[in-house]
Amino acid sequence: MTATDDSLEALDPAYVADVLSRPPFVQISGVCNVRDLGSYPTTTLNLITKPGYAFRGAEVSNITEQGVQQMRALGITTAFDLRSDPEIQKYCAPIPTIEGVQIIRTPVFRNEDYSPESMAKKFELYASGTTEAFMKLYSQILDRGGSAFGIILRHVRDRPNAPFIFHCTAGKDRTGVIAAILLKLAGVEDHFVCQDYALTRIGREPDREKVLRRLSKEPLFAANAELALRMLTSRYETMQATLSLLRDKYGGVEAYVKNYCGLSDDDISIVQSNLVASTKARM
């Protein structure tokens, strides 16, 4: 299954602005693709994912002073950075100082995973645009990311009243995988997890040109912008396949969290409880 042509076209700016102005999207000036993982229905009656607690986004390197104030208003006190040193340096996207926010480095990949050979293979997979290629990439994220994801999950276990944001560079792949893990632990049905993932197609649109400029410096993409655009795809079907992968290869989300993130059954129960809120309390 290849990326369809219409998934590569630029979106209408008015449509993008309208969608970004409404939940689950959240405005943090200078940070792209931010949204709240709260208010999704779960499989338990009268329980939804906790609003205003877990936020996902793209890199926060260019956050503005207004963005800092917006982050503070959201109550965010911790930011988990899933990026590794080589990409921070390559894209000149340093870790900012945000007053009142602790930034915790939680890289998914090791520095050696960014060797020219490794990156060439990754870019070839992204450029193919197929669901099968994305499953190879997301399997790498799941295989490598257990330690990083475990740090985020322990925050949920230990600090249920301390809102946080997690991000990678684009807020799509590594961020999308841990977002799916959190939503599935909370008891959210696959459909809504896939919908959340697909929203990145709109959420990333304001940074479209910046991303393409970055990718144009890579030999594989320099002469073919369409290949670069395929790297930006965020299709519902891709997350559907990822959730199937999580079940078939890793035994499901709870087994993955135990085997790769090092959480116990008791830890998982606490995390699940801390990720949800009662709809009755909001009436």
Image (cartoon, grey):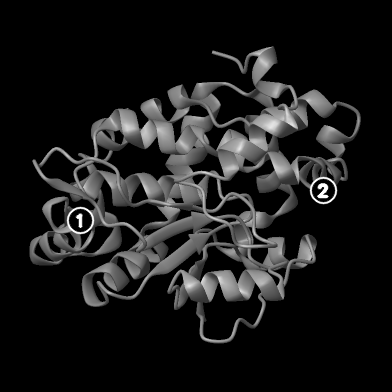
The disc label shown at residue 282, or none: 1
The span from disc 1 to disc 2 (Cα, nearest Å) is: 44 Å
Of residues 210 and 253, the one nearer the viewer is 210
Label 1 or label 2, whichever lies nearer to me, is 1
Q: Residue at x 61, y 37 (%)?
A: 18
Helix, strand or loop under label 2:
helix
Residue at image point 64% right, 69% down: 67
223 up-or-down from 75: above or below: above
| Residue 65 position within the rendered picture, expressed as x and y whole percent measured from the top left | 70, 76
Residue named by callout 2: 214
Left or right placement of residue 270 versus residue 54 in this view: left
Furthest residue in direction front, as rendered: 283
The numbered disc on residue 1 is none
Q: Is residue 114 visible?
A: yes
Looking at the image, which is closer to me, 202 or 178? 202
Residue 68, picture quadrant = bottom right
Horizontal and vertical percent position of residue 15: 65, 30
Q: For the residue marked with disc 2, what is the amino acid?
A: Arg
Q: Nearer the viewer, residue 231 or 218?
A: 231
Residue at 14 percent of width and 58 percent of height: 281
Give left or right: position of 264 versus 179. Answer: left
